[in-house]
Image (tube, grey):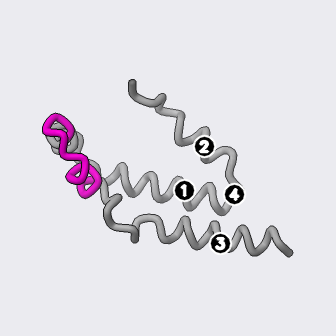
């Protein structure tokens, strides 16, 4: 069953503003590069690694800005 469209926005709403923006930026970047027809074909063939490649999740660089903001949030929270 697919997740509701607002699922990621609901997650983002619980984050600190800097983390929220980094998270949503990463989500927008993933959505912008997604090719639904290719992803559907890969899923039909059971190619999970192909899907991860297609949406960029096998490349950890896509989440670097979110990780940096999270680290900054943890440091700031400890002060």
Secondary-structure class at tag 3: helix
Marks 2 & 1, CB-CB < 8 Å contact = yes
Within 10 Å of disc 3 (Cα), the crowding (few <14, some 14-19, many 20+) is: few
- Of marks 2 and 3, which one's residue comes earlier in the chain? 2
Q: Which residue is mark 3?
A: 71
Q: Which residue is mark 4?
A: 17
**Pair 3/4: label in front:** 3
- Of marks 4 and 1, which one's residue comes earlier in the chain? 4
Q: How many marks?
A: 4
| Position in image of residue 35 (x %, y %) | 22, 47
Q: CA distance from mark 2 to mark 1?
A: 9 Å
Secondary-structure class at tag 1: helix
| Position in image of residue 52 (x %, y %) | 29, 53
Range of magenta residues:
43-54
| Position in image of residue 27 (x %, y %) | 45, 52
Name the mark on residue 23: 1
> Which quarter of the image is occupied by the N terminus?
top left
Marks 3 & 4, CB-CB < 8 Å contact = no
- Of marks 2 and 4, which one's residue comes earlier in the chain? 2
Instruction: Using the rendered view, name the quadrant where residue 70 is placed.
Output: bottom right
């Amino acid at each position: 069953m697919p997740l509701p469209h607002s699922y990621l926005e609901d997650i983002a709403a619980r984050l600190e503003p800097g983390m929220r923006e980094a998270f949503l930026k990463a989500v927008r970047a993933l959505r912008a590069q997604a090719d639904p027809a290719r992803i559907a074909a890969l899923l039909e063939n059971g190619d999970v690694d192909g899907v991860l490649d297609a949406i960029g999740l096998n490349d950890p660089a896509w989440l670097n800005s979110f990780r940096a903001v999270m680290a900054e949030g943890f440091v700031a929270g400890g002060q």
